Structure formats: structure tokens, C-alpha cells
Amino acid sequence: MKVIISEIPEEGLELELTEKISSDESIAIVSPVKASLRIDKKGSEVIITGTAKGTVELQCSRCLKIFGVDIDSMINVVYHPASEINKEEHYELKSDELDTGFYKNDILDTEDLLKEQLVLSVPMKPLCSEGCKGLCPKCGVDLNMTQCSCAASEIDSRLAVLKQLLGKKNKT
């Protein structure tokens, strides 16, 4: 949905949205995103608060399986006109400006906002389950499905010297 900034009433807007957001290389959104947004305007600033919920497909960082996870994101973003940063050659965001966005041509696209908020809410290390055992580093078998016969006590050759030091310490 496109929101025209100049048409936002003085008392603000309350929006209930259900949008099908296209997936891209950064995230696979597999369900329509439901959002409840409050949009207020103060001068040229647009303040958006609310929530967004959707289901995304992620890859487990241990076993590499694709799985779906429900994302519930809180939204609190302040938008400024893009012309504000065009005046400066280099614009660096400060820590208190990290929830800042920019709009062009008096239009704010809620699809971009919702996609951005879902991407920001994705866990840094997605896991299909807390107990995921991952893949065997030797043979690559999925340890959630089967037990491999690889020797578990092998020591990384780069750390073998440390084991020798431990052996000397135990003898004294």
C-alpha cells in the first residue's frame, strides 16, 4: 500500500493491513503479512508505530534444513524526506537515528516498511529447534536423523600441541 504523506490527516491514520509481500534474496516470506500501524505526521516527519506478523522460511544454521517460523515484529520508525540527506554529501546515522527511514516524492510504501521490519526481526542464528544436533563435521550426515560412526574423540591437529601440554601438567 502506498501512503501519500501530504494526505495524512492531522489526527493521524490507523491502518490494519494484510499484504502479500514478494520474497527476494534476503528473505522468503511465505504468508501474507498482517500489520496494525499508527501513522502520525509532525511537519515533514512521519512517525510509524505498530506491529507486523508473518511467516518466513529460514535455513537452520546447524542442520541446513529449511523451516518456517512466525515473526512478530514491533515497529517504531521515523521517516524523513529523502531531500534532507541529498543536501549533505555524506550522511552518517547516529545511534539514536537507527530507527530512521526516508521517503521520496511524498509517498511511503508500506510493503517496503513491512519487509524491512521482518528482515530485522529474523534471528541471527536461526535454528529449526533448540535441540538441533546439526551435521557431522566429518561425514556430513544429519545427526537429527541418524547416528554416524565417526570417531568423536579426534582432536583438531592444530590443537594437538595443547593436549601435549596438558599431559605434561598432569604428570607433575
Image (spheres, rainbow, N blue to C red):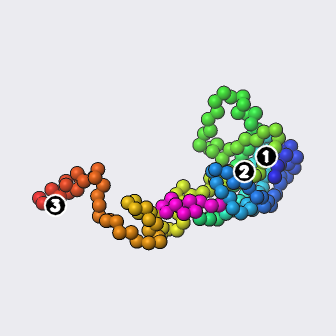
The residue segment tinted magenta is 56-66
Q: Amino acid at mark 1?
A: Leu
Q: Which labelled disc corresponds to residue 45?
A: none
* Cα distance between the residues tagged 3 and 1: 68 Å
Left or right: residue 96 versus residue 149 is: right
Whole-percent x, y for residue 49 in the image: 73, 54
Give neighbour class at mark 3: few <14, some 14-19, many 20+ (Cα, 10 Å): few
In terms of depth relative to the viewer, which is nearer, 91 or 18?
18
Q: Secondary structure at mark 1?
A: strand
Answer yes or no: do the residues labelled 2 and 1 have beta carbons within 8 Å?
Answer: yes
Q: Earlier in the sequence, mark 2 or mark 1?
A: 1
Answer yes or no: do the residues labelled 3 and 2 have beta carbons within 8 Å?
Answer: no
Whole-percent x, y for residue 142 in the image: 46, 66
Q: Secondary structure at mark 2?
A: helix
* Cα distance between the residues tagged 3 and 2: 60 Å
Residue under circle 1?
108
* Residue displayed at 85% across by 48% down: 8
Q: Amino acid at mark 3?
A: Asn
Q: Which labelled disc corresponds to residue 170?
A: 3
Residue under circle 2?
113
Q: Secondary structure at mark 3?
A: helix
* Residue displayed at 79% across by 46% down: 108
Q: Amino acid at mark 2?
A: Leu
Q: Is residue 40 magenta?
A: no
Q: Earlier in the sequence, mark 3 or mark 1?
A: 1
Q: Which image quadrant: the C terminus?
A: bottom left
In terms of depth relative to the viewer, which is nearer, 87 or 22?
22
Whole-percent x, y for residue 21 in the image: 74, 55
In terms of depth relative to the viewer, which is nearer, 79 or 142?
142
In terms of depth relative to the viewer, which is nearer, 130 or 87?
130
Q: Earlier in the sequence, mark 3 or mark 2?
A: 2
